[in-house]
């Protein structure tokens, strides 16, 4: 049985955990293009080497991060998510862009 | 204390039909109905050896959010310093700290809890959220000298008395069911409270009784737990 160390609950059987995907820093929500958002939400790098991943301890619903070597499947360390997410992010709307002049319809006189 | 007709209770345990099949007699504790005893009303000896009781109808509450510890301290609650520790309040309420900012409260064995009543009536502070636990979670008590040996059959965490102190908490898998185990001894009797998802408690109840059979364990009523205190 593989073991994983949960930062809150300690060492547990791997069957108590659920994989939650790769961790990527979130793009600036006011500046990011749709393409960048799609990359962030839907696409994974699938790198060979050391990556940071989300894991959840199912029994306590506790989400945390783990550094794992995807080649050797070795867990290097696990740590609470608040090591990275230590500031509240308010998703305030981006300022309205300046209104553009409407293009004139074809045939409209100058 | 007189016996109670359980079918008239406003709230029944998810294990009600199991209890009826086993010939349970019921009593009212506070305003809740629980099993008093099965067959013999001298179950204390069984509870001291190996017993399983269902307290799912007794009051529980939960609170979560970054403001929870300060809010609870403001209500004169005594909190464990570390997560995954539990402490008993002066009125016998069990306060389990499941993480830095999450609390689970369970009443005493009389079905009364001033602590839960005042917390549920108090206004929630900013960043404190209520987590009602009475419906979402069942509450079983596995007790007796053979309780740790029984749990070793269905749980990967070492819960033996010399490894898992009174008041410690393990949030883990028990017979493949996720649950919270709190060691909460009844007097001199080793005892574990098990809180788990109420929708799968029938499976957990059957699994634990099956695991207990090897050590001559049996279901006991709340009266036996009260006698052990």
Image: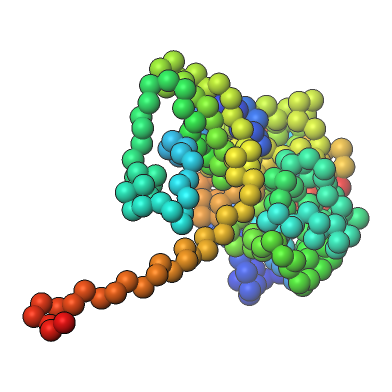
The residue shown at (41%, 51%) is A32
Residue at the top extreme, as displayed: A72
Q: How many discs appear?
A: 0
Residue at the bottom extreme, as displayed: A109
Q: Position of residue B116 (x, y in %)?
A: 78, 64
The residue shown at (80%, 32%) is B165
Residue A100 seen in the current view: yes
Query: Residue B66 appears in which quarter of the rendering?
Result: bottom right
Q: Quadrant of the C terminus of chain A?
A: bottom left
Q: Position of residue A106 (x, y in %)?
A: 10, 77
Q: Is residue B122 left or right of residue B151?
A: right
The residue shown at (64%, 45%) is A86
Residue B206 seen in the current view: no
- In this view of the protein, which residue sits in the foreground, B219 or B121? B121
Residue at the left extreme, as displayed: A107
Q: Position of residue B99 (x, y in %)?
A: 69, 45
Q: Is residue A63 left or right of residue A94?
A: right
Q: Is residue B50 left or right of residue B178?
A: right
- In this view of the protein, which residue sits in the foreground, B10 or B160? B160
Residue at the right extreme, as displayed: B90
Query: Residue B106 appears in which quarter of the rendering?
Result: bottom right
Coloration mode:
rainbow
The residue shown at (13%, 84%) is A109
- In this view of the protein, which residue sits in the foreground, B189 or B74? B74
Q: Position of residue B188 (x, y in %)?
A: 87, 38
Asked if A99 appears above or below B167 in the picture, the reply is: below
């Amino acid at each position: 049985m593989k073991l994983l160390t949960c930062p809150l609950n300690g060492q547990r059987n791997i069957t108590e955990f659920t994989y939650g995907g790769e961790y990527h820093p979130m793009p600036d929500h006011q500046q990011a293009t749709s393409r960048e958002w799609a990359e962030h939400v839907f696409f994974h790098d699938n790198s060979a080497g050391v990556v940071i991943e989300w894991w959840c301890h199912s029994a306590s619903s506790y989400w945390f991060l783990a550094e794992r070597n995807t080649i050797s499947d070795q867990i290097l360390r696990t740590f609470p998510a608040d090591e990275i997410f230590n500031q509240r992010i308010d998703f305030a709307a981006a300022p309205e862009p300046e209104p553009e002049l409407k293009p004139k319809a074809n045939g409209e006189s100058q | 204390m007189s016996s109670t007709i359980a079918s008239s209770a406003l709230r029944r345990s998810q294990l009600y039909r199991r209890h009826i099949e086993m010939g349970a007699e019921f009593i009212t504790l506070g305003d809740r109905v629980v099993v008093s005893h099965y067959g013999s009303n001298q179950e204390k000896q069984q509870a001291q050896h190996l017993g399983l009781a269902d307290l799912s109808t007794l009051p529980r509450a939960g609170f979560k959010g970054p403001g929870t510890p300060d809010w609870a301290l403001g209500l004169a609650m005594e909190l464990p310093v570390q997560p995954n520790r539990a402490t008993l309040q002066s009125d016998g309420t069990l306060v389990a700290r499941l993480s830095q900012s999450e609390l689970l409260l369970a009443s005493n064995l009389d079905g009364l809890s001033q602590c839960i009543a005042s917390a549920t009536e108090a206004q929630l502070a900013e960043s404190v959220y209520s987590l009602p636990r009475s419906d979402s979670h069942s509450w079983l008590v596995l007790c007796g000298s053979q309780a740790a040996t029984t749990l070793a059959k269905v749980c990967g965490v070492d819960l033996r008395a010399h490894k898992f102190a009174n008041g410690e908490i393990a949030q883990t898998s028990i017979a493949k069911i996720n649950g919270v185990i709190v060691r909460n001894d009844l007097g001199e009797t080793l005892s574990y409270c098990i809180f788990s998802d109420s929708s799968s408690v029938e499976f957990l109840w059957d699994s634990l009784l099956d695991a207990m059979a090897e050590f001559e364990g049996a279901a006991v009523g709340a009266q036996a737990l009260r006698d052990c205190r």
